[in-house]
Image (spheres, rainbow, N blue to C red):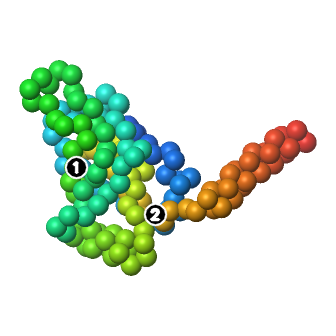
């Protein structure tokens, strides 16, 4: 029971809310991120964004590209570059599986959430996704609106 007191809830820091609208998500995987101390402190303050970011491979490793983690104000000369590429920490088997899906099926790797897990480690929820066409997006909007309208009608009926 003493271990339960030390467990922290999952704290979502940044979320890519448009990803589920712009992409059809096939699979998700949790990845660690290689960060410096000032980046961790900046993420904890909650001002980082992953909306325009994506994952790419270089030399058999996965990298998070274009994620914005602003500079930590109290760090003066030891600060980090806000949009630098950050290495994603995954097992070799997981990397090969993701890269195979990207190469074969024309998928992309999109970050969905940046969060701290129960142990206080920064994690990234990475999705293997396929881009939606305009007509698919319209269909999604129609389904969402009909679901809302149906809920209103059901509440009105009793």
Q: Which residue is drawn at 22% across and 30% down?
A: 71
**Upstream in sequence: badge 1 or badge 2:** 1
Which residue in the protein does label 2 denote? 129
Q: 10 Å neighbourhood of mark 2: few (<14), some, or many (≥20)? A: many
Q: Where is residue 12 in the image (x, y as percent from the top left)?
A: 40, 39
Which residue in the protein does label 1 denote? 85
Vertical order, 112 against 158 (above or below): below
Q: 10 Å neighbourhood of mark 1: few (<14), some, or many (≥20)? A: some
Which quarter of the figure has residue 122? top left
Which quarter of the figure has residue 155? top right
State the quadrant of the C terminus: top right
For mark 2, give the secondary structure: strand
Q: Residue at x 24, y 37 (%)?
A: 82
Q: Where is residue 1 in the image (x, y as percent from the top left)?
A: 32, 41
For mark 1, give the secondary structure: loop
Q: Position of residue 139 (x, y in %)?
A: 69, 59
Q: Which residue lies furthest to the top in this view?
A: 74
Q: Where is residue 78 in the image (x, y as percent from the top left)?
A: 9, 30
54 or 74: nearer the viewer: 54
């Amino acid at each position: 029971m003493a271990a339960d007191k030390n467990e922290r809830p999952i704290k979502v820091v940044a979320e890519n809310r448009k990803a589920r609208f712009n992409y059809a998500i096939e699979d998700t995987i949790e990845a660690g991120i290689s960060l410096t101390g000032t980046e961790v402190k900046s993420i904890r303050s909650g001002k980082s964004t992953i909306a325009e970011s994506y994952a790419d491979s270089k030399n058999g490793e996965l990298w998070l590209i274009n994620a914005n983690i602003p500079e930590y104000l109290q760090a003066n000369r030891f600060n980090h570059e806000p949009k630098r590429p950050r290495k994603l920490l995954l097992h070799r088997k997981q990397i090969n599986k993701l890269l195979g899906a990207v190469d074969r099926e024309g998928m992309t790797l999109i970050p969905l959430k940046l969060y701290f897990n129960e142990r206080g480690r920064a994690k990234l929820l990475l999705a293997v996704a396929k881009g939606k066409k305009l007509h698919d997006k319209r269909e999604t909007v129609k389904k969402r609106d009909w679901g809302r309208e149906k809920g209103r009608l059901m509440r009105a009926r009793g």
